[in-house]
Image: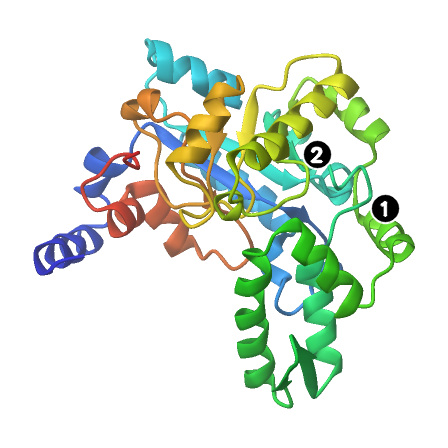
Amino acid sequence: MNWFEQKILGLLVKTHGKISKPLFGGLGHIFMLHRVLPDNLRNQFTYNRDLAITPEFLEESIQYFIKEGYQFVSLDELNIILNQGLGSNKKKLICFTLDDGYKDNWQYGLPVFKKYNIPITLYVTNCFPNYTANLWWYWLEEKISRNSSVIFNKVEYSCNSEKKKLELYNKLRIFLKNSSIEEIRAIARDFFDKTDEIIKSEVENLSLSWSDIQELNQEELVTIGAHTQNHVSLKHIKLEDDLRKEIQTAKIELETYLGEKVKHFAYPYGGLEDAGAREYRMVKDLGFDTATLNYAGNIFNQHKSSIFALPRYPLGNSISREKLNYFLNGVYHFSTNQFNKTINY
């Protein structure tokens, strides 16, 4: 952000959305959730606490959106709006998505969405219902929290204070996120001491089963989307054939279980370092209608031609009302994207 853009941002913040919302508020917003957990379960985690939202905070957020006059739409409806326009309905839009396929989405999340008749998209990564997911983000937190030092890739790291533990978690998190599925499996075995049997047991405890997913798919408010076979950072897959296999295999398996076309896709991790032009093109070629990122931004008419790189905001208990308003009024969009409405690719 250059000097001029910083001055513009300061003006947008000071005017509390009066200037920014008409210019950068867009048609609406897509929100990204992962887990939905009561506070006592959410607080079992430190570094992964923000991966979960409490049912109470979710409901408070929904009530706030209603108060502010937002309309809740599904991804199918959003796709139609982007292609055909809003028509006579000029209400701002909110679209909810949940990633991975955690069992608590059904137990704690769906009752809240059903209470307010809100459609959701649940992006399933197939390694969850197949019980083969490498839950390294939880394993890493557990490993670091229980030890004063760890040896990773033959290097010993001290983690004998809370500051060092957090620094090490963030350091190794980046490495693991950018690793291949083969590398992660080796790390699961050699660093985390996870056998296939242990992995199956742990994932089964957290994940929706295939029968759960089939049942959820019968819910009028629920759309099942795809989220790859193994939840790896797609941009770090070197060979295009391997990239295609990672996405297509998941799509075919999902469609076999559901008996219908899977139209929506989310990039694992979803930052610009995890997906780019090659991945957007691949998702389009494989017949999806939309694809979402984990990247800040609002939805604009221009996303009609950028529909495989739709931005999303995270929503969780750590999101203050002030920050949420920055999402809604376009300030955060400008701070991230400046004058760009969409990601160029």
Q: Are marks 2 and 1 in contact (CB under 8 Å)?
A: no
Q: Dividing the image into 4 quarters, which one contains the C terminus? A: top left
User: Which residue is nearer to you in this view: 150 or 224?
Assistant: 150
**Vertically, is 190 above or below 239?**
below
**Residue located farthest toward the left when viewing the structure as drawn:** 4
| Residue visible at 68% across and 42% down in the picture | 230
- Helix, strand or loop at label 2? It is helix
Q: Using the rendered view, name the quadrant where residue 213 is placed.
A: top right
Residue 310 point in image, percent of width and height? 41, 33
For disc 1, the neighbor class at 10 Å (few under 14, some 14 to 19, many from 20) is some
| Residue visible at 24% across and 45% down in the picture | 17
Residue 221 shown left or right of residue 343 in the figure: right
Question: Which amino acid type is marked by label 2?
Answer: Leu
Residue that numbered label 1 is attached to: 204
Question: Which amino acid type is marked by label 1?
Answer: Glu
| Residue visible at 64% across and 75% down in the picture | 153
| Residue visible at 75% across and 36% down in the picture | 106
- Helix, strand or loop at label 1? It is helix
**Vertically, is 322 above or below 24?**
below
Residue 340 shown left or right of residue 114 in the figure: left
- Tell me if residue 272 can be seen: yes
Residue that numbered label 2 is attached to: 110
User: Which residue is nearer to you in this view: 28 or 16?
Assistant: 28
**Vertically, is 80 above or below 11?**
above
